[in-house]
Every structure is written in structure tokens, then in C-alpha cells.
Image (cartoon, rainbow, N blue to C red):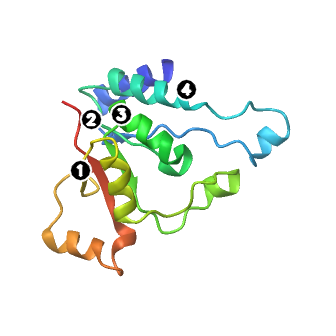
Amino acid sequence: MAHLRTLARLQDETGGFTEFVPLPFVHQNAPIYLAGIARPGPTVQQNRAVHAVARLMLHGRIDNIQASWVKLTGAGTRAVLRGGVNDLGGTLMVETISRMAGSQNGSMKTIAELEDIAATVGRPARQRTTEYGVPATERVSTARSDDGRHALTLSVTPLQ
């Protein structure tokens, strides 16, 4: 809560954040966990709580809360989408940090895979620009091509 209050205050002062990405600790291969210094990463319930509370506390300040599907798994990502998260992040080309820490969730998703995650919880996905604008038609076409699919980022429509 203190961290979220600090983020809210900083956003009030600067207006500089376009999104908040709660990154859960992946502990399995993390040196500080293996050394007995850190506890295991959060449970699904704890991840859901952090994402939901962030959505509530940052409402009107930071409009976009992003799910880290690499860390959350498909089921975890669906759970936070149900709780109001509105950004799936991107397809990624190569993700190594979470994988090295022990994540088993893959290092890349296709556009279709991300759209399926959103669709299974009734949340339509759309491509966006870095600053959450609507991309040019050419950019959307390129992203859906084999050459361009790695550069895609997606958002989901906010809950009403």
C-alpha cells in the first residue's frame, strides 16, 4: 500500500506514468531465494489482490495496469484481467530474465494467443501504440505479418 501511495503521489506531481506493471517475484531459480534470503513469490490470490488494489488506488491517475503474462501464466493473467487489468503487454521476441528465474510460461506469445487469453474472459484485445493511442492501419497489418508480429503490444478494453 505504501508503494502504491508513493506512485500515486509521484503521478500527481509529474503525470509521467502511462502504465503500472506489477511484476511478481519469480523465485524458483532466483539466487536470493536459493540462498534462503527471500520467501517464495506471491500466490495467485496475492497477485490478484495486488493488481486489483493497484487498479483501485491508481484510478484516475494511472489508467493502465499491465499483466506480466510471462510471470503470471495464462490462468493468472486471466484472473487479473477479470479483476480490471487492461493491458496484456506484448508478444515479446525473447524474454530471458523471468525464464532464468524459473518461469515456465514461455518467452513469446503470438497475437492470436494473447487475443485468446483476453477473449476467454470476455475482454476484447486491440493493438495500441506505446502511449496507448490507436496505431496506423499499416502498423496493425505489419504486426500481424510474420515479419512484424514481435513488435506488437496489446491492450484490453477496460471494464465498464
Task: Give the mark toward the camera: 4 or 1.
Answer: 4
Query: Upstream in the sequence, badge 3 or badge 2?
Result: 2
Secondary structure beneath dot 1 equals loop
Q: Secondary structure at mark 4?
A: helix
- Foreground residue among 115 and 100: 115
Question: Real-space Cα distance between discs 2 and 4?
Answer: 21 Å
Q: Above or below — where is 47 with respect to 103?
A: above
Work out whether mark 1 precedes mark 2 in sequence or the reverse, and give the earlier one: 2
The residue to which callout 1 is attached is 132
| Image quarter hosting the C terminus | top left
Q: Nearer the viewer, mark 3 or mark 2?
A: 3
Bin the neighbour count of mark 3 within 10 Å (Cα to Cα): few under 14, some 14-19, many 20 and up.
some
The location of residue 158, given as percent across then percent down, is 23, 37
Residue 148 circle label: none
Disc 4 marks which amino acid? Gln
Point out which mark residue 63 bears. Answer: 2
Which one is closest to the eye, mark 2 or mark 4?
4
Q: Nearer the viewer, mark 3 or mark 1?
A: 3
Task: Tell me the CA gap for discs 3 and 4.
Answer: 14 Å
Q: Earlier in the sequence, mark 2 or mark 4?
A: 4
Q: Residues within 10 Å of mark 2 (few under 14, many from 20)?
A: some
Residue positioned 27% across, 28% down in the render: 61
Give me the residue at 23% from left, 26% from top.
Answer: 60
Q: Which residue is mark 4?
A: 46
Q: Which residue is mark 3?
A: 82
